[in-house]
Amino acid sequence: MAEQAPARAEAAADGLFSRTYAAATASFAGVMFLTGFAALAVVPTLPVAAQDLDGVSLYPMVAGCFVAASLLGGVLGGGWADRAGARRPLAAGLVLAVVTLLVSATSTSIWQLAAGRFLDGVAGGMVAVSINTAIGQAYPDRLRPRALALMSTCWIVPSLAGPPLAGLVAAWWSWRAVFFGLAALTLLPALAVVAMLRGRSGQAAPEPPDARTPRPALLVAAAVSAGAALAQYGISGWDLRHLVCTAAGLALLAVFAARLLPPGTWRAARGLPATVLLRGLASGVYFTLEAFVPLLLDTVRRVPAAVTGLAFTGAAIAWAGASWVQGRLHERCPRHRLVAAGALLLAAAVALATAGTLPALPALTAASAMLLAAVGMGLLVPSLTLLSLSHSPPGRQGYASSAMQTTQNLGQITVMGLASALFHAGLGAGAIGLAGYVAAFGLLLVPSVLAALLAARARTV
């Protein structure tokens, strides 16, 4: 016992909030809290803004361009972080986020709103990649799991308070007030990070001369971003225009997407390529579940909106709680096993969602799928981020974070698109359209089980 006390005291003196790391931890946590608040609060505001600007028909484009643009922002931020350290692109992303919120707030047409959301996606991609890169550059290995868990925790309050507060402001005052207010809130962490940047030259590690992972060109990233935007718009309808957009988007993704990823990603080569692929598979499953389960609860099971909202709240808490758990298991359980466990939980959640389509079972069966899937992601996502940082060559942590962001978005777009196609094909094939939900959920079993089987290929030596 006497020998353990000094060890505990030393660990506490060198923890996340010790004198060495307190400034970085507080800044990163503040960034995640307020940018998360801004990202989530915008969701209930966009439909109101689109209606006010007479652009309801273009709403799918406005809602989807954020994800597409974050591909470009992730590549831009990752390359910059490798060259000059993560703080500069982080500060630039936050400043751009403030500017884009003002662009959206002053929109006089749906096209200006779409431009604001696109630029906000660029900023969001830069911030997300920079935060992950900064954690890799600022903390030792033993503190990274807890730092990532803290970042997940910082999303709990935004997920609980952001959407309802924004909805009230939009209803009682104006949707423009939501964007102006979010710009004012986001300005605080932007100024804090810029102030922390003063006097620092960046802490990027020198790149080894034999590094084989080339930095992707921004033109390639722009092509992938355009392809993602076209594909997202295309799957929102079934007329000739939408089909042409879908085909063009998929063609751009097929030609250019691989150039943004580590060689061997599509064949799950061991190390970073497999880690990057797993992120895309898991994200595709989770965010497709997050889209279809509320739709099922609302249109088929006739669950009150408040219950669906509670499911979202529970999922946010479950994700943060599981992330906290993985932060305490890093010395007891290999990371790839946590990834496998998280993927299996995703598969179990898909099975629950499928069972929730049966009229004989309670509607809460489907709602519980969101909570179980969030637990799986809370274990899986931080573990994959840590594995990606471990597999990164010195000075290339920004590249790895950018690749993870790219496959996350591509996974969302691809899996959601395939599930949507099956869903629409299945509508009318069964009672009250349940066949469409069964087909969509059945598809999700493939990437979730595949992720569990491939998890060992992401292990560190």
Image (cartoon, rainbow, N blue to C red):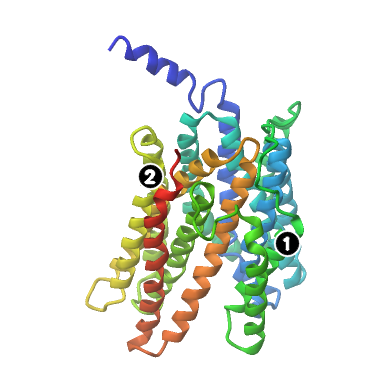
For mark 2, does the 10 Å Cα neighbourhood hold few (<14), some (14 to 19), or many (20 or more) residues? many
Front of the two marks 2 and 1: 1
Task: Left or right? Give the position of 100 relative to 32.
Answer: right
Mark closest to the chain's N terminus, 2 or 1: 1
Question: x, y percentage for residue 367?
Answer: 34, 65
Q: Is residue 374 visible from the viewing direction of this image?
A: yes
Amino acid beneath label 2: Gly
Name the residue nearer the viewer: 93 or 235.
Answer: 235
On-image quarter of the N terminus = top left
- Residue 309 figure quarter: bottom left
For disc 1, the marked residue is: 222
The C terminus sits in image quarter: top left
Residue in the image at 44% along x and 80% along y: 423
Tell me residue 344's x, y (percent).
33, 57
Q: Real-space Cα distance between discs 2 and 1?
A: 36 Å
- Circle 1: element type: helix
**Number of residues whose C-alpha sits closer than 10 Å to that of mark 1, classed few (under 14), some (14–19) or many (20 or more):** some
Q: Residue at x 76, y 67 (%)?
A: 112
Q: Secondary structure at mark 2?
A: helix
- Image-based side of 403 in relation to 444, left or right: right
Asked whether residue 173 is in view, the answer is no
Per the image, the residue denoted by label 2 is 321
Whether tag 2 and tag 1 are in contact, CB under 8 A, the answer is no
For image coordinates 45% across by 40% down, the residue present is 460
Q: State the mark number for residue 186.
A: none
User: Is residue 412 positioned above or below 135 on the image?
Assistant: below
Q: Quadrant of residue 178?
A: bottom right
